[in-house]
Image (tube, rainbow, N blue to C red):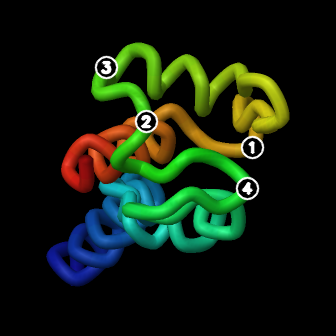
């Protein structure tokens, strides 16, 4: 009986402490948050991914704080989501 209760307690604690999504998908985020204004290899409303800065810090700052007509995503996306987007952009430049 005690082993059974300990097992249930361990599973319950693990499900509470484990994050639902540890690694956000950069491509999925790009498609849902960015693709309406940006394309990988052609200009839309905003520049193409291939025309963006290759500097990760600059990309992160632009996504977080916004730039020109691009809105800021600070508070709308988590730090992990912004990092996943930067990784996706860098991989597609």
Q: Which numbered disc, 1 or 2, marks the residue that appears first in the sequence?
A: 2
User: For numbered disc 2, what is the local secondary structure?
Assistant: loop
For disc 3, the marked residue is: 55
**Horizontal placement of 86 versus 46: left or right?**
left
Nearer to us: label 2 or label 3: 2
Which residue position is annotated with label 4? Answer: 45
Q: CA distance from mark 4 to mark 2?
A: 13 Å
Badge 4 marks a residue whose secondary structure is loop
**Measured Cα–Cα span from mark 4 to mark 1:** 21 Å
Q: Helix, strand, or loop for circle 3?
A: loop
Tell which circle, 4 or 3, labels the residue nearer the N-terminal end: 4
Q: Position of residue 27 (x, y in %)?
A: 38, 67
Front in this rendered view, residue 32 or 37: 37
- Give coordinates of residue 91: x percent, y percent: 20, 50
Q: CA distance from mark 2 to mark 3?
A: 9 Å
Residue depicted at 46% across the width and 27% down the height: 59
Residue receiving disc 1: 76
The vertical placement of 21 against 84, above or below, is below
Helix, strand or loop status at disc 1:
loop
Return the residue at label 2: 52
Q: Residue at x 72, y 23 (%)?
A: 67
- CA gap, disc 4 to disc 3? 21 Å
């Amino acid at each position: 009986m005690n082993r059974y209760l300990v097992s249930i307690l361990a599973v319950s604690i693990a499900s509470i402490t484990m994050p639902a999504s540890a690694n956000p998908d950069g491509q999925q985020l790009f498609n849902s948050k960015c693709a309406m204004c940006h394309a990988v290899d052609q200009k839309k409303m905003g520049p193409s991914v291939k025309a963006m800065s290759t500097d990760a810090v600059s990309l992160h700052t632009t996504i977080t704080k916004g730039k020109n007509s691009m809105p800021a995503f600070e508070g709308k996306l988590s730090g992990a989501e912004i990092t996943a987007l930067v990784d996706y952009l860098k991989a597609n430049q």
